[in-house]
Amino acid sequence: MSYFRPDIDELVGYTPGEQPQAGKFIKLNTNENPYPASPSVVRAVQAVLERGLARYPDPLATGFRERAGAVLGVDPDWILCGNGSDEILTLVTRAFVAQGELLRLPYPSYILYKTLAQIQGARSQEIAFAQDWSLTDDFAAPAAGLRLAFLPNPNSPSGTMLSPARVLELAERLPCPLLVDEAYVDFANDNCVKLVAQCEKVMISRTLSKSYALAGLRFGFIIAQPQIIAGLRKVKDSYNCDALSIAAATAAIDDQEWLADNRRKVIATRRRLTAGLRTLGFQPIESQANFVWAPHPGLPVRPLYEQLKQNRVLVRYMDYAAWGDGLRISVGTDDQIDACLGLLKTMI
Ligand SMILES: *Cc1c(COP(=O)(O)O)cnc(C)c1O
């Protein structure tokens, strides 16, 4: 006999990429940043520790929202912070989608979205990307009970992006809010922040995990119109971000010079990785993110993933029905990417 809700019993649960806690791996499987964060982050954390942790943190992380608002050109009241952007995704699911209602997502994309719907006891509906990774108007079609749509942009695993103009078209047609997940957008050529003012239905999530090299910190935020933010504030835990992470995130977003330098390095190595994979017969997709999706038309790639792992290089193997399988390789340092490409060369 189980004490759980039947839908929780049925749930398989989201499995994040492997995080080996022992041994020395070259980790190219969860899109972490290979470089250390801005040195000002360490100083900010030390300063908080010296002051002590006896007091509760600012429930609204106002210092962070002011700095982020200045960087992004939005009012601080348009921002709400969370314990990683995964918490932001949980929050919007809880706030907009009731039990039995419908959440829409593209396919293939971030697997967590579906799990969030299941935990909520909601239904989810996947709309397939076209072969060129565009999305047809089907993504915006009305459907019974449709309450929320998720769109990662750039998408994972493809690294491809819809233009802001296309995202706005989809948002305007949709009968519900659209959460544009911009986890990787700092590595892209464009972003959708300006759409938030143009359309109440557009909400944007950002994270400090990837482009600010702070995946271990757990800090993300959402940008939306203030009446949306006000509703979400009612749903969140009072102290969802701790004093250390707020201080660290504020220091990180204040160091835009660090971000620009990191972005330059990652994009240069992404080019090197894409070219190297092409030489080995893969058909890598041009990426706007810090990873490259690489199907191989001539070879089964699962054994390549296994052999890389035996040689202590971790990449992500994924298999999607109509798209087939491929390796998703995070952009590491040049040395890490050379090691990975060197091993692949011996196997192919
Ligand atoms: C990594 C990732 C996130 C999660 O970011 P956190 O802030 O670490 O929770 C959200 N969306 C996508 C598409 C991601 O790849």
Image: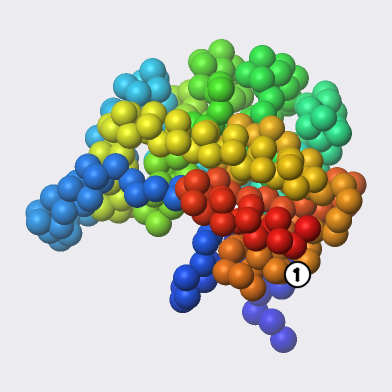
- Vertical side of 301 occupied by 229: above or below: above
Closer-to-camera residue (194/285): 285
For residue 183, say whether it is visible: no
How is this picture coloured?
rainbow
175 to the left or right of 262: right
Residue 77 in percent (x, y) is at 37, 26
Q: Which amino acid does label 1 sit on?
A: Glu
* Residue sitting at x 33%, y 34%: 258
Residue 8 in percent (x, y) is at 68, 68
Secondary element at tag 1: helix
Residue 201 in percent (x, y) is at 61, 24
- Vertical side of 30 occupied by 150: above or below: above
Residue ID for mark 1:
10
- Quadrant containing the N terminus in the rendered view: bottom right
* Residue sitting at x 70%, y 69%: 307
Residue 162 in percent (x, y) is at 69, 25
Q: Residues within 10 Å of mark 1 (few under 14, many from 20)?
A: few
* Residue sitting at x 38%, y 32%: 261
